[in-house]
Structure formats: C-alpha cells, structure tokens
Image (spheres, rainbow, N blue to C red):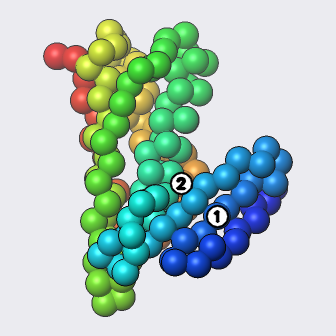
C-alpha cells in the first residue's frame, strides 16, 4: 500500500507528495475550469496515468519476452464532458514505428492494452480508445 500527502496550495492548485520517495507533483485546474493551466490538472493525470500504466505493463512483458520498447512514444487526448463535468473519453496512440517487432510481439502488446490496473479501474462510462502504430 502506498500513501500520498496532498496539500491545497490555494489558487486551485494542490501539491501531492509520495510518502516513500518524497517525489512531488503539483496540479492546477485547467483554463476551461477557472484555473491557470500551468500544471497537469487532476483529469490530465488520470488520462496520462492510463497511458503510463499500459506502457509500464508493455515494458514488463517486453523485457520478460526478450525485446525492448525503449524509446516508443504515445500521444494522449482527453475529452471532457459537462453536466456533470467528467472525463468522457481518453484517446491514446502508441507509436512503435521505430521498433522492428515481429507479429508475436505486436500481438502481445495489443493484448496488454486492457490488461493493466488503470484500464481495469476506470469507470466503464469512460471510453478508452487505444491504438498502436507499428512499422509497416
């Protein structure tokens, strides 16, 4: 179990400190919700956590299977909805075009898209549109 301490800093910002390693993250409300948008918003963090979690599981499985995805990248897009304000959709496109992956490795990466903790933890109403791009 991990613990985090969160302090409300004022001006719609929080600072989160990880108890074990003392790493800190500052959040800010987005511009479209009365913030300054100078830091990740909490909903940005949820969306980017989805991407990072999937990447982490892919990295673990790639290492276990003798290949690497080092240097791969992804673009994450968060779509918000109002009434009530919430994340409606998270779109992620992973780019593996810089890697020479065989069909078995590509299939393994595709299988992992919904097999990590964050995708399994998000509410089913949040659409998860995840695409993987490979070298032709």
Nearest the camera: 87 or 110? 87
Q: Quadrant of residue 57?
A: top right
Foreground: disc 1 or disc 2: 1
- Residue for point 44% across, 72% down: 29
Residue 50 visible in the snapshot: yes
Nearest the camera: 81 or 38? 38
Image check: 86 left or right of 12?
left
Q: Given the current orientation, which residue lies at the most extreme left position?
A: 136
- Identify the secondary structure beneath mark 1: strand
Residue 124 visible in the snapshot: no
Q: Given the current orientation, which residue lies at the most extreme bottom position?
A: 83
Q: Which residue is mark 1?
A: 15
Q: Quadrant of residue 82?
A: bottom left
Q: Which residue is mark 2?
A: 118
- Identify the secondary structure beneath mark 2: helix
- Residue for point 46% across, 19% down: 70
The answer to whether residue 70 is above or below residue 131 is above
């Amino acid at each position: 179990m991990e613990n985090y301490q969160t302090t409300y800093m004022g001006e719609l910002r929080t600072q989160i400190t990880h108890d074990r390693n003392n790493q800190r993250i500052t959040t800010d409300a987005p511009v479209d919700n009365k913030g300054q948008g100078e830091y990740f918003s909490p909903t940005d963090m949820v969306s980017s956590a989805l991407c990072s979690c999937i990447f982490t599981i892919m990295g673990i499985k790639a290492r276990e299977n003798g290949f690497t995805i080092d240097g791969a990248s992804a673009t994450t897009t968060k779509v918000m909805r109002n009434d009530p304000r919430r994340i409606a959709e998270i779109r992620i496109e992973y780019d593996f075009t810089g890697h020479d992956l065989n069909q078995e490795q590509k299939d393994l990466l595709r299988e992992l898209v919904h097999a990590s903790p964050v995708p399994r933890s998000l509410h089913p109403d949040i659409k998860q549109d995840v695409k993987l791009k490979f070298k032709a």
